[in-house]
Amino acid sequence: MMGRKRKLPFGYLMEQGRVVVHTEEGTWVKKLYEQYLQGASMRELLASMQQTGVTYGEGMPWNLNRISRLLSDGRYVGKGSYPAIITQEVFETVTQKKEKKAPAVQVTQAYKVLRQKCGKKITVHIQQEVLYLLNTLAGRPDRIKKPVVPISKNQRLLLLQSELEEIMQELPVDEGRATQKLLEIAQVMYENIDPREYETRRLRRIFGKEECSPELDADLIAATVEEILVDGNDRVRLRLKNDQILERGK
């Protein structure tokens, strides 16, 4: 089974067995480094590239991670078999500027809980988004809603109900068997109660007592968040304990 071919960095292409500079993409690489040195933020660079119509690769839109990696890729100064697109001086200046601007991620108890809930490296951006989303629920229990997607019917419950109907149709009715079957049905119905209903009520009680906080609370995250979802565009969503998806603007 053949493996996938390794994608060349943005700005390069393969020509007659050699890596050469892609004229158009190479120009954009230079512009991104120049704009960053002139004061543009990562998000501004992302917005700029999204407006150009130029993609990172086929079927690969730009996102913050790709912008950040591009501004940290030493191959652009001519490492290995890659021809230089920018100078070593420009690269080092950008690197120094990024290091100064990058806020340190503190390994707090909240950070550790976030790591358990998220499959990606926890950045300051993710922490800020989680805090924002949780604060939208503080004092607003009405925003906690049980998802409308129903849980599928329990097949054992359907079988027991069918068996009860057969017992009731046999005259005279065997009250002992009917009572036993009712008890079995009650047990399965109890076990099949939608847990999201309970979790929704529990979450409403929790957030009804909460106030907006300037920092993340490890206990609150552990008690209310099931999973932290981060997509390729660095959009952060929360899946709460009742399966409700929480995201900006919704």
Image (tube, rainbow, N blue to C red):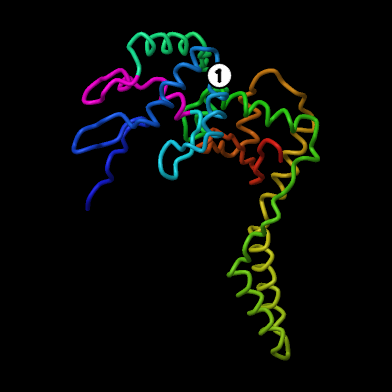
- Residue type (three-letter) at the residue carrying disc 1: Ser
Q: Which stretch appears magenta? A: 65-85
The answer to which image quadrant residue 92 occupies is top left
Q: Nearer the viewer, residue 115 or 175?
A: 115
Q: Where is residue 182 drawn, in percent x and y?
A: 69, 71
Q: Is 40 on the left-hand or right-hand side of 25?
A: right
The answer to which image quadrant residue 28 occupies is top left
Q: Where is residue 236 drawn, in percent x and y?
A: 59, 34
Q: Nearer the viewer, residue 224 or 250?
A: 250
Q: Where is residue 245 drawn, in percent x and y?
A: 65, 43
| Mark 1 crowd level (few <14, some 14–19, many ≥20, 10 Å Cα) | few
Position above or below: 50 against 211: below
Q: Nearer the viewer, residue 35 or 191?
A: 35
Q: Is 37 on the left-hand or right-hand side of 181?
A: left
Q: Nearer the viewer, residue 68 or 201?
A: 68
For label 1, the residue is 41
Which residue reaches farthest front? 23
Secondary structure under the numbered disc 1 in the rendered image: loop
Q: Where is residue 148 drawn, in percent x and y?
A: 71, 55
Q: Which residue is rendered at x = 46% and y = 22% of the image?
A: 32
Position above or below: 238 against 86: below
Q: Which residue is rendered at x = 44% and y = 30% of the image?
A: 66
